[in-house]
Every structure is written in C-alpha cells, then in structure tokens.
Amino acid sequence: MFPGQGAHKLGMGKDFCERYAESRSVFEEASDACGLDLADICFRDEAALALTEFQQPAILTVEIAMLEAMKAHYGFRPVYFAGHSLGEYTALVAAGVYPLADAVRVVRSRGKLMQQAVAAGQGAMTAVIHRDLDIAALSRFAASFEVDVANYNALDQAVISGLAQNVTAAVAALREDDAWRKLKTVPLRVSAPFHSRHMWPVQEPLRAALAGVTAVNAWAAVSVASNATGTFHVGSRDELEKALVKQVTSTVRWVQNMRDLLDMTQEIVEVGPGRPLRGFFASLGVEISSVRDAASAASSTE
C-alpha cells in the first residue's frame, strides 16, 4: 500500500537512488515523461516540493522507485495493491494498470488542477479524532456547514474538508455538542480542500487526461482497491476512470479498503517516503512492525 500527498519530505528517495540502479531508472523515466527534474525536486528543492503540482508526481515516482528496488533485490512480489488518495495512482502503476510515464503526467495535471480549484488560503482540512466515531453522524453534521468528509481513515479518525471559514465553524460546533465529548481535532497543513465539493472543477479535465492514456491494462485493476467505492476495481476501463474522477470530490473510504485488504492477506507492506497508513490499521486491531527502508534492511544484513 502507498501513502498519498503529505507523506513527502525533502531528500525522499535519495538513499534508494544512491544504492539501486532500478530506482535511478524510475526517476529518469518519470522526469522525462513529465518534463521535471524530479530528483532535484525531491532531494533539494523544498519550495517546489511543497507545491501540489510537483509534489504529486514526486511522491508517485519515489514510491515506484522504492518498489522496483524491493522487487529486484529482495524478492518482493505483491499481489494486491492499495493507495490513499494520490497513492491509488501508485497502486495502479504497481499493478501494471498504467505505465509510469503516463501516470506521472496525469498526476502532475491532477495536482495542478487541484491547486487551482480553490485559491490558496481559502480551503482547509481538519482531522476529527473520536473514540466512538460515528461516520454517518459526522457526515450529516459537516454537511450542515457545507463541509464534506474527505477521508474515513480509521475507526476513530476522519478528515473534514471545505472552505476555511466553514471548517472552522463546523469544528467549533462539534466542540460544543455533547454528543462529541472528548473530541480531538488537528488542522492539516494542506493547500486546498481535497476530496470535497470544491474539487468539482477538476473532474472534467481529469477525465480527459485519463481518457488520453493509450496503454491501459484495465483488467489488472481488479487487484487494486478503489478509494471512491471502498471495494476493488472491477476491471473495466470505463468504471476505472469513473472511480478516479469521482475520487477527487468524494470520501476516501480507507476503512473499507483496509478491511478488504485484510480479507485477502495478513501481510501488508506500506511503501513510501513516510508511513502514515500503518497507524490506521491499529484501529482494526492489526499488529504493526516497521522497517525504515530496504536500504537500511540491507545494511543490517550485509
């Protein structure tokens, strides 16, 4: 499984590129495809890495670079794939649905569109943490403030998204409601209200970008979890594109994705520059262990 936007950090992927030719090759292919020096952005250009347009192809590239090294040197052979938000695109590349070059072009466009949909500073996202989280009740409560549930991340955590003043009002009202006692909220550092109604302008141009990809192995998508539906993709290109277009405005149904993955396998590996997803599994009672990266694992055994 692959984390999405927000998992980035300056220097991400550098250790893999220094050690593995497979990782360097991924960076070169992705950079050529999207017209960016992704190594420079990931390793040195913190200002560019903070921009959604560049952050999305950068994260996808790093995750595939890590995956290719793990496959080549550690016998890693995943069978099912999932990703959170942007990470779903990495999962589709990993599963062989989209070629890397096409995917980085699409997500660069996606990132630019999402960045432009709402002016900087006007949108907000806040994590809502509650031991007895009722996601349906939260959705109704948020809707009354024209705010959407962007992510259902864990049994005790969701994220609400919308215009900044509406999110602020919704959080204040939640804190005053007796039904939400012991509520914890955490504002997220994001550039736009992702997975909300305010991403509607992204849908049609994203649909066109996806339709422009010529080499799509849609049947392979049956091994990839869909954020928008909460189930696995069905193997139809039309349904795949509908789900990815819907994803930008709808709730990331990560709790259902996790449950489906656990129905398929008991060994799940998070691959990415950060590891935000593993903690969500703890809410389902899953035991979690950690290896920092393949390079550190190798140094401990060689």
Image (cartoon, grey):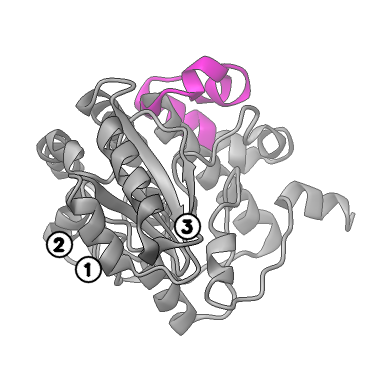
Q: Is residue 220 visible?
A: no
The C terminus is located in which quarter? bottom right
Pointer 3 with pointer 2, Cβ within 8 A: no
Tell me the residue that label 1 is attached to: 235
**Mark 3 or 2: the one toward you:** 3
Task: Verify CB contact (< 8 Å) between mark 1 and mark 3.
Answer: no
Q: Main secondary structure of the magenta part?
A: helix
> Going by the image, does 96 lie left or right of 287?
left
The Cα–Cα distance between marks 1 and 3, rounded to whole angstroms, is 40 Å
Q: Is residue 43 above or below residue 243?
A: above
Return the residue at label 3. Answer: 183
Query: Hey, what amino acid is under mark 1?
Result: Gly
Magenta extent: 26-52
Give the residue at mark 2.
239
Residue 53 percent coordinates (x, y): 36, 26
Which mark, residue 178? Answer: none
Q: CA distance from mark 3 to mark 2?
A: 37 Å
Q: Are marks 1 and 2 in contact (CB under 8 Å)?
A: yes
Neighbour tally class for label 1: few under 14, some 14-19, many 20 plus, Cα within 10 Å: some
Residue 30 falls inside the magenta stretch: yes
Looking at the rendered image, the disc whose residue lies closer to the viewer, 1 or 2, is 2
